[in-house]
Amino acid sequence: MSTLEAASPSLALDAGDRSGMHSGSFFVPPPSRGTGAAVLYLKSEDGLVLALDAALGSQLWNFSAGNEIAAVPTPSRDGEALYVSSLDCHVYKLRAADGVPLWNFSAGDGVDGAVLLSADERLVFFGSEDASAYAVHASSGELAWNFSTGEPILSAPVLAPPPPTTTTSPPTTTATSGHHGSRAPTVVQASPTGVQASVVQGSDLLYAIGAIDGALRWTYVTGNSVVASPVLSADGAVVFAGSLDYRVHALRAADGAPLWSFGTGDHVVVPPVLAPDGATLFVPSNDATLYALRTADGSQAWARPMGGAVRAPPLLRADGAAMYVGSPTHAVLALNASDGAALWTFPTQGGVSARPVLSPDGAVVFAGSEGGAYYALRAADGALLWEHGTQYPVNDPPLLSPDGAVMYTGSADHDVVALNATDGSIMWTYTVDPTKH
C-alpha cells in the first residue's frame, strides 16, 4: 500500500483563528476497504481526526482527542493504523478502517511533534513538553524507554542508521560524548525545539539516543536552541541542524563530531533541504536570504536575497536542477539550483508562507498565498493555469491525490475543498462542524 504524506510537516493556520482544518492530510488506502479506494485523513486544531472518502467527500469516521492535534498523524506502512500525537498529553494508535483507538499512551505533558516509527515498525518514538523523549511498543503502547532532556521537546525526532564502524569521541570543545553501545539505530532529538522554550530555558543541546535502549550516545552544544527537526544525509552519516545561533551545523551522526558550521545573518528556523545528489544543502534564513552550501565542507555555493524571511523549505524538482519557493514579497519563484538565478517569477496576492507542491509529472506547480488564493502554474514558465479564491489567508500547502488529478485544500472556515487539478473547478466541499463530533 502506498502512502502520500502532506507536502510539508510544518503547518500553521492564521494566528487570528486556530480553529479551522489544516491541509496537513495524507492518503492511505486501507486494506479493509478492499477496493483500494483512497481515503483522505485530516486533522484539525480542534483535536479532530477525520477520514473522508476522497472521491465523494463523505465522512467515514472521526476521532476526537482531548486537545489540539498539532502534528500530522503518522500512518503505518500497510495503511492499517494511524499514530496521533496530541496536546492532551497522549499518543493514540487508531485503526485506520474505522478510527477505533487500539491504545493510548500518556506522557507527562503535551506532545507537539509527529511520532516516528522504527524501520521495523515495532517502536514508536516521540518527544513531549514534559522534557522527555519516549519509545513505546507499537503493538501494545507500553513504554520501552524514556530519556529526560531537561527541556521541553516540541518537534519530531529523526532516525539515524547504525554506524558502520566503531568511532572515536568528538572534540570535547564542541560536543560531549556519551558511550557507544551496539550498532543499533540512533534517535536524534533537538531539545527544546521551540522559540518559546528557548527564551525561557536557553537550552542549546542536540541529543543522540540509542533507539533500542534509550541510552545517550552523544550530545552537541550549539549557541542557541534548535527549532526544527534535524535533517539527515541520504546515507545517514551526517546530521544537519539549523539553530537560533544563526548557524547551520553539520555533525557526524555516529558520534556527534562537528564537521563544519556556517553562519547566516539571523535565526535558522526552517529545516534545510538536501539536493538529490547530496552535494548541496539549501538553507532559508531569517536574514531574508536563501543559501546553497556545499555539504562536503560547508562553503557557500551561492546566496539569493528573498526580500524577507522564507517560512517554508524550497521544493526541489526530482532531478535537482530547479527549485520552487514561496516568497514573502508576494511571489512564487522558480530558481536554478546551481546558481540561484530566477527562472521565472509569478506575482501573488499576499506573501507565500507555505511550501509549493509539484504535480507527479512535474508539469504543474500548486501554491497558496496569504492573500487568499490557490494557484496552478505551469512549471516550465510560471504561466497561470487557474486560480481558486478563498475567504481566508492560505498558510498551509495544498495536497494532491496520488495521481495528481485532485487537489485538496483546508481553510480556517472549516471547509475542506476538492478541486479538479486540471482546471480548478470544485468537485466537492466538506464542512467540519466541531460541535457535532
Image (cartoon, helix red, strand yellow):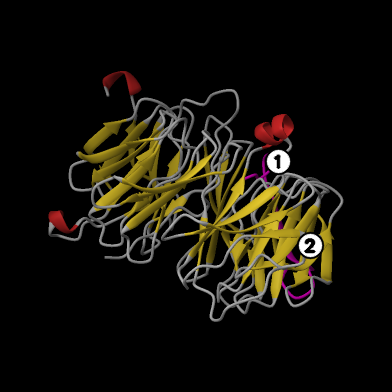
Q: Per the image, is 351 magenta?
A: yes
Disc 2 target residue: 291
What is the CA distance from the residue labelled 1 to the residue labelled 2?
A: 26 Å
Image vertical order of residue 24 relative to residue 87, above or below:
below
Local SS, label 2: strand
Question: How far across and how far down the image is residue 436, in percent?
Answer: 27, 21
Q: Residue at coordinates 49% horizontally, 29% vertically from top-left?
A: 412
Q: Do the residues labelled 1 and 2 touch (CB within 8 Å)?
A: no
Question: How far across and how far down the image is residue 240, in percent?
Answer: 67, 63
Find the magenta span and give its range: 336-354
Decide if residue 126 is on the left or right side of residue 178.
Answer: left
Q: Per the image, is 337 magenta?
A: yes
Residue 115 in view of the camera: no
Disc 1 marks which amino acid? Ser
Q: Considering depth in this image, is 183 or 228 the residue closer to the camera?
A: 183
The quadrant in which residue 174 appears is bottom right
Disc 1 target residue: 203
